[in-house]
Image (spheres, grey):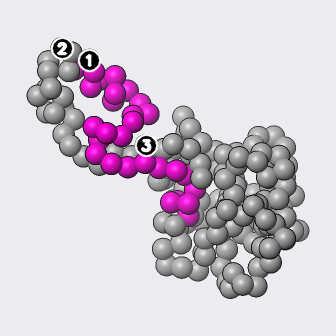
Amino acid sequence: MPQHAVLFVADGSPDDTAPVRALRDQLDASVSTAASGAAARRALAEDLPDCVVTDYELPDETGLDLLEHVRSERPDAGCILFTGGDRAVIDTAAFGDVLPEYVDSDRPDAVDRLVDATLDVESGPSEEVPKADYEGELRALLREEAGDDAVAEVFPEHEQTYVRGTR
C-alpha cells in the first residue's frame, strides 16, 4: 500500500500523462488526478494529499489560487507548480510561501525533476540508510543466527533509498 498521496491537477485528461505515470511508477505514492480547480477542490474536500502538483493555467482558476487553498487546509502539504512557459510572467509575489517548488514542464528532464521535487528521499549505502520495510529486521535476525558474513552474502552492498516524506 502506498505511503504517500499526490494530487496531480492539469487541464484536459491528466490520468495517462508522462508525469502521472512517473509519479506512480517511481514513487511509493498513490496519485489521483483532477482536470480543473473545482475538481481538485472536491477531491481535497474528501482527502488531503501529502503533495499537490498543479499546472498554472487551469480552466477555472490558476494553479497558484489552488495551492493557496491547499496551504490553508493543510499547511504542511507539498505544493509544486508544474508548468511550462516563462516563469517571469507568472505573478508569484502575491502568494508568499504558497509556492515552495516550481518545475518547468518544458524542460527535457521535467518529469525526473518533478519526481525529485515531490518526495524527500534519502540515499546512500544500504547499511547506513534507514529501512522502511522488513530488511532491517531480517538483517538483525540473520546476524544473530548466522553472523555478519551471512548478512553480507544475503544483502550485498548497494545504494539504498528511503522516502522520508514529502517536500
Q: Badges 1 and 2: C-beta atoms under 8 Å apart?
A: yes
Q: Quadrant of residue 46?
A: top right
For the residue marked with disc 1, what is the amino acid? Leu
In the picture of the structure, the residue carrying the numbered disc 3 is 162
Question: What range is drawn magenta here?
Answer: 114-142
Image vertical order of residue 76 relative to residue 38, above or below: above
Q: Position of residue 117 (x, y in %)?
A: 56, 60
* In-front residue for pair 66/75: 75
Q: Position of residue 101 (x, y in %)?
A: 64, 64
Left or right of 88? Residue 164 is: left
Q: Residues within 10 Å of mark 1 (few under 14, many from 20)?
A: few
* In-front residue for pair 123/156: 123
SS category of the residue bearing label 1 = helix
Q: Badges 3 and 2: C-beta atoms under 8 Å apart?
A: no
SS category of the residue bearing label 2 = helix
Q: Residue at x 66, y 53 (%)?
A: 78
134 within the magenta span = yes
SS category of the residue bearing label 3 = strand
Q: Position of residue 83 (x, y in %)?
A: 67, 74
Q: Position of residue 36 (x, y in %)?
A: 81, 63
In the picture of the structure, the residue carrying the numbered disc 1 is 141
Image vertical order of residue 7 relative to residue 150, above or below: below
The circle drawn on residue 145 is 2
Q: Residues within 10 Å of mark 2 (few under 14, many from 20)?
A: few
Separation of marks 3 and 2 at Cα, in angstroms = 26 Å
Q: Badges 1 and 3: C-beta atoms under 8 Å apart?
A: no
